[in-house]
Amino acid sequence: LGGQARVEGVGGTWKDLTDNVNSMAENLTGQVRNIAEVTTAVALGDLSKKITVDVKGEILELKNTINTMVDQLNSFASEVTRVAREVGSEGKLGGQAQVRGVAGTWKDLTDNVNSMAENLTGQVRNIAEVTTAVASGDLSKKITVAVQ
């Protein structure tokens, strides 16, 4: 990419044709480079970049699809991080990830994170209930959650 046609000594229609081909090649090069920059950033875990070049047609579809994918990955990562921080670091139980518009593998991952958080919440609450009862002298309570 980035090459330009150089035809010495031509004018008129041939010059116009050469200039138009060069302009088209320059536009396409800029579009592909911006798309490559964003997809490379995503592959490296950087979700801060979006495709910004002005495009039309099929390249516009590609731009919109990739930018939507970046938004959904960002939302997923933010929600999973939030739930993990709430449960793991802050001790807040019952948190659930809310990721709009995801499907397929991303929905499965979100559901699995939510299931894990729900199971952990149930286990901790049951242990806390039994511990509180024992501290109060009630030895009749037992841990009832299923664990593996």
Image: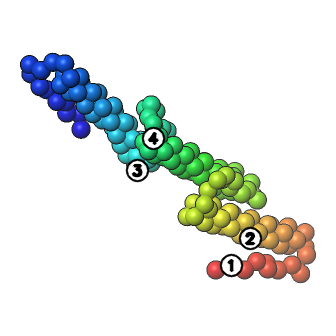
The earlier-in-sequence mark between 3 and 1 is: 3
Q: Residue at x 34, y 40 (%)?
A: 32
Q: Do the residues labelled 4 and 2 touch (CB within 8 Å)?
A: no
Q: Do the residues labelled 4 and 1 touch (CB within 8 Å)?
A: no
Q: Are marks 3 and 4 in contact (CB under 8 Å)?
A: no
The location of residue 12, given as percent across then percent down, is 19, 19
The earlier-in-sequence mark between 1 and 2 is: 2
The location of residue 105, given as percent across then percent down, is 55, 64
Q: Which amino acid does label 4 sit on?
A: Gly
Give me the C-alpha separation between circle 3 and circle 2.
36 Å
Give me the C-alpha separation between circle 4 and circle 1.
54 Å
Q: Which amino acid does label 3 sit on?
A: Ala
Q: Can residue 17 be seen in this view?
A: yes
Give me the C-alpha separation between circle 3 and circle 1.
36 Å
Please name the residue that numbered disc 1 is placed on: 147
Q: Is mark 3 on a helix, strand or loop?
A: helix
Q: Is residue 32 above or below residue 121?
A: above
Please name the residue that numbered disc 4 is placed on: 57
Mark 3 vs mark 2: in front: 3
Give the side of residue 71 with respect to residue 6, left or right: right
Give me the C-alpha separation between circle 4 and circle 2.
53 Å
Q: Which amino acid does label 2 sit on?
A: Gln
Please name the residue that numbered disc 3 is placed on: 43
